[in-house]
Amino acid sequence: MSVTIGMAELLTRARLLDRDLAPGEPLAETVIRPLTAAVAEALAEPEPEIIETGSPADRLWELAKDATRLRVQPGAPEGLIEATAALQHLACLFAEDADSLAARIAELAEIQSGLETRIDVAVDGPYLVTNPSKIINWLGETVSTFPQMALCRCGQSTTKPLCDGSHARVGFSGAKDPARVPDQQDSYEGVQVTVLDNRGVCAHSGMCTDRLSTVFRVDKEPFVAPSGGRADEIIRAVRACPSGALGYAVDGKKAPDPEREPAIEVSKDGPYRVTGGIPLDGDVPREHYSLCRCGHSRNKPFCSGMHYYVGFADPPPSDEPSLFEWAGGLPALTRMTQIFYEKYVPQDDLLAPLFARMSPDHPQRVAAWLTETFGGPKLYTEQYGGYNHMVAEHAGKTLSEQWRARWAQLIGRAADDAGLPTDPEFRAAFAGYIEWGSRIAVENSQPGATPPSNMPVPQWWWVCEAKPGSRVSALATPEEKPQVQIPASDEPVGFAEHVKPLFREMDRKSMSFVFDLWSHEDVTRHADAILDRLRQGTMPCDGAWPAEHVDLFARWITEGTRP
């Protein structure tokens, strides 16, 4: 069967299935639309008549497999590839359990096994990612992957990072802006290292300007001043560049790119950061590059930093983030440990001999431990052996308090350099763990120490439940007083209409360690204690309520705490 005829049959089956699968035409934008366009371009004959039997879920799975078989044939059009990505995703969502899901992905992967890992850029459409080995979010957590994927690049999808067909609805254009920054490489020669810079592909992530502002200078010309930093600092900043705009040369020879595993990172409120040399359709080979995700880049498909100017934003984090989330996830923690072991340890008389024989991946190991300890994925347990392995690493080392104190001091500096949050709540928790964990390590390293075995990796949390936003910062803009409607004396007082509006979001956060001030159940349970504090003027923490608000709350209690 030719690809063209096969697509026509797929389209007919998809239309039949769309009516039976679920309300809302779930296949209309992601499967039927691209297939219709592909078929219209290639086939002038009427669509075949097909009669489908079986449950919608079974038909969906068969449709996904048949689309994949067509997709692997030479010359598969973009519309077919985009539809195949959507069908694979939907079919996997209908898997009955984890084993069934794994089996489906394995079967689809086997069909596509002859295709190379690559990224194709659909005309005015999504990124078509074939056989991705690893996709992570900005925290370093693994994102579910399928053999064929379509990643949003218009910025409008409601299922980010996956495409939902919004590009067609909004009329997205993938064209480059004629006024974009020219694609050219400039050289800035220093005493030991020459910095190579291509402003044309810069994603303006700030990883150079934020961490080495004496060399990479915002709003100054020239942008690069190699004399402003040490060679090792410059090289570290260049290697951290996610877009590939920066490079460096020593003695006239360009340094090779780092060798990393193929991966795609969905950065927070920003581009896709691609590493490992994944081929990009129509582009020269690059080890790493950044692809636009907001839909407004002037240099599509590459990111030009426009996400910042258009206010592109992912869904906000949870109301109660873990320390791992608040720190910035695995990338931030890895950045910190790399700075610590590459910058501070080698130049320190105490620590340099101690870590002289550490394994090359030691910074990654420490980052994985902190990730798990701070509430992230169980990376250290899964990759390195968990608690028992960490204890074995310190056994017999006879670490001294002098070593420990220096380690704790310098890891704090590395946290500053890496851009970890500096709010008091996070730093209190971070410093608390560093002190506790480093003292445990010293204890376990002493001769004759017998630490308990087979313990879980410790879990660290906010100190005394003091989380970000749980207090009023002295630098914060005062929050507007709530607009409260006082009911007439003959009207009933209700929680949702009259009492809940009395409590600002700031009030809610400040008491979240005890109860939820926006919860009728919680406020009812603690109503008398809350009223006592309101009358004493000790709640809220930034000033007493007006008397009429206190009276309203008391009246709500008297009337029976209506919802």
Image (tube, rainbow, N blue to C red):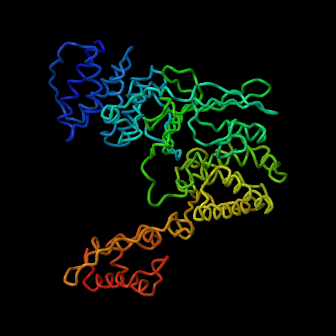
From the top left corner, tell me how far across and down residue 122 is, in percent. 40, 25
Among all residues in the image, which is located at the extreme right? 349
Query: Is 103 situated above or below 35?
Result: below
User: How many marks can you see?
Assistant: 0
From the top left corner, tell me how far across and down residue 553 is, in percent. 33, 81
* Residue at horizontal 55 percent and vertical 49 percent from the top: 329
Q: Give 465 or 235, whichever is nearer the viewer.
A: 235
Location of residue 490 by image quarter: bottom left
Q: Give 345 or 454, whichever is nearer the viewer.
A: 345
The quadrant of the image that shows the C terminus is bottom left
Q: Give 198 or 512, whichever is nearer the viewer.
A: 198
From the top left corner, tell me how far across and down residue 400 is, in percent. 80, 61
**Residue 240 left/right relative to 145:** right
**Residue 421 left/right relative to 93:** right
The quadrant of the image that shows the N terminus is top left
Location of residue 484 by image quarter: bottom left
**Residue 527 left/right relative to 562:** right
From the top left corner, tell me how far across and down residue 72 is, in percent. 38, 19
**Residue 408 left/right relative to 104:** right
Location of residue 533 by image quarter: bottom left
* Residue at horizontal 29 percent and vertical 12 percent from the top: 2
* Residue at horizontal 20 percent and vertical 80 percent from the top: 491
